[in-house]
Image (tube, rainbow, N blue to C red):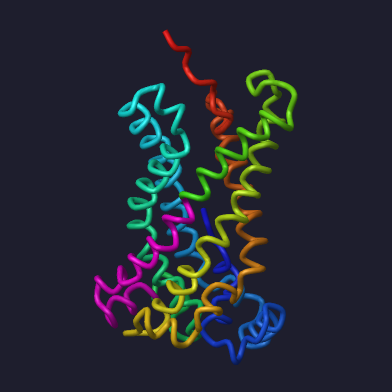
Amino acid sequence: MDFGMSRFNVYCKIIDPAKYKSISSGFGVLLREQGFKGFFRGWVPTLLGYSAQGAGKFGFYEFFKKYYSDIVGPEYASKYKTLVYLAGSASAEVIADVALCPMEAVKVRVQTQPGFARGLADGLPKFVKSEGVLGLYKGLVPLWGRQIPYTMMKFASFETIVEMMYKYAIPTPKDQCSKSLQLGVSFAGGYVAGVFCAVVSHPADNLVSFLNNAKGASVGDAVKKLGLWGLFTRGLPIRIVMIGTLTGAQWGIYDAFKVFVGLPTTGGAPPPPAKA
């Protein structure tokens, strides 16, 4: 799951910068106005949406990575492995976001408009009544704009970082390392990859939040209100910390599951096939 900033409702700062002047003051204002429970408002659509998206993303990535590798053959799959990672992760994210988009729309509306709804149970029908079923998907294209580059960076950089760690930082070949060491490498590689992800996806993340909160708003409205500098920088430091930690945890959990079922951990590309 990729909760990003949304778990703590800091999107309110993006929507109303005059009120939420900084990350620290934003937490204070939110605590005073909504209490401690305000930090967890919208957790049900967040949990369901990002669980479905995460399962689809990781599962379809494994499928498409093998699918594209089989298409080009072992030699080219090894030679151009980064392109295989990028293509596989992009294809997986396109599918995964279709499951995420409706929950993302409801989550952002619940979080950024106090009084709109208490959560998913009353927020979803209220959203549909107001904007129709298609309204749940009005943020799909910006969501793709945020998530596809994010996921491409996440998977390709993770695979590359882990491969470099096994090549330059760990003297023992991967298949001879303990499972605990391999899982530690997965977490470290995931954390660094998460930092890159946060930077790449942040402008589109701000756009998605704005569009889902403001009825009838366009991308132009968002750019005019937030400004180009605001799109790239507003809320970025906390997002870097959170995305790095969460991405590291994701890879750690995912690879722990793979170890549990007897599969090798992700990353650490095998040597290219020997030529005949």
Q: Is residue 136 magenta?
A: yes
Q: Nearer the viewer, residue 10 or 107?
A: 10
Given residues 75 and 15, the one toward you in this image is: 75
| Residue lying at 70% horizontally and 23% vertically, measured from the top left | 177
Residue 73 lies, in percent from the top left, at 35, 23
Q: Is residue 142 magenta?
A: yes
Extreme residue in the bottom direction: 18
Judging depth in this view, the residue of 36 and 167 nearest the camera is: 167
x, y percent for residue 267:
56, 33
Q: Main secondary structure of the magenta part?
A: helix
Task: Report the residue that reaches farthest toward the top.
Answer: 276
**Stretch of the chain drawn in magenta:** 123-151
**Residue 252 against residue 27 in the figure, above or below:** above
Q: Nearer the viewer, residue 21 or 170?
A: 170
Identify the residue at horizontal 50%, vertical 62% (top origin): 201
Count of numbered badges drawn on the protein: 0
- Quadrant position of residue 62: top left
